[in-house]
Amino acid sequence: MAPSTLPSASRCNGACREKLNSMDLLQYMAPVAVVLLVPATLMMEPDALGAAVELAREDPSFVWMLIGKSSLAYLLNLTNFLVTKHTSPLTLQVRPANHGALSAH
């Protein structure tokens, strides 16, 4: 049996036996995503920040729409993690219509 197929408990000390739950995964992933995506967005779309500020000045509801869409994206990711935790990763591959329908808007 190759070492990569051994159970993780046999290869680690007590510190790595702790499992991460869905909220912890999102908590660790979100800062990394911000650090990587915000600079990339600002480089690829230099006028995006100015356009967002202008839209917010013209229509204050834009800020609420932005917060709402961000919250829905967060909840969608959390739901995906919870579905994977309680069933299997195959579940999200078998039912992609739900994911597409929720993330399309």
Image: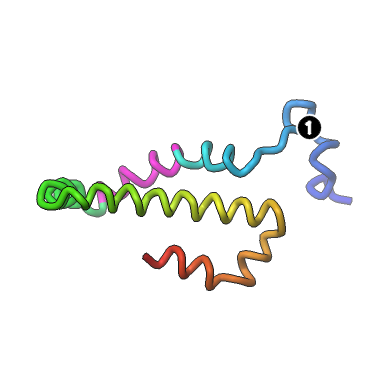
Q: Nearer the viewer, residue 55 or 48?
A: 55
Q: Is residue 77 above or below residue 95?
A: above
If the image is split into quadrants, where does the C terminus sit?
A: bottom left
Query: Farthest top residue?
Result: 14
Q: Is residue 86 above or below residue 8?
A: below
Question: Does residue 38 show up magenta in the picture?
Answer: yes
10 Å neighbourhood of mark 1: few (<14), some, or many (≥20)?
few
Residue drawn at x 60%, y 71% as measured from the top left: 95
Query: Relative to 9, is 58 on the left or the right?
Result: left
Q: Secondary structure at mark 1?
A: loop
Q: Is residue 80 above or below residue 97?
A: above
According to the picture, the residue beneath numbered tag 1 turns out to be: 12
Q: How would you classify the magenta stretch by its main secondary structure?
A: helix
How is this picture coloured?
A: rainbow
Check disc 1 and give the amino acid type: Cys
Residue 65: x %, y % from top left: 28, 53
Residue 22 lies in quadrant: top right
Question: Does residue 66 show up magenta in the picture?
Answer: no
Q: How many marks?
A: 1
Residue drawn at x 84%, y 45% as measured from the top left: 6
Q: Is residue 36 above or below residue 95?
A: above
Residue 40: x %, y % from top left: 32, 48
Q: Nearer the viewer, residue 36 or 82?
A: 82
Query: Relative to 61, is 31 on the left or the right?
Result: right
Q: Which residues are magenta?
A: 31-43
Query: Farthest right residue?
Result: 1
Q: Nearer the viewer, residue 52 or 9?
A: 52
Query: Relative to 92, is 73 on the left or the right?
Result: left
Residue drawn at x 20%, y 47% as measured from the top left: 49
Residue drawn at x 78%, y 47% as measured from the top left: 4
Query: Relative to 58, is 45 on the left or the right?
Result: right
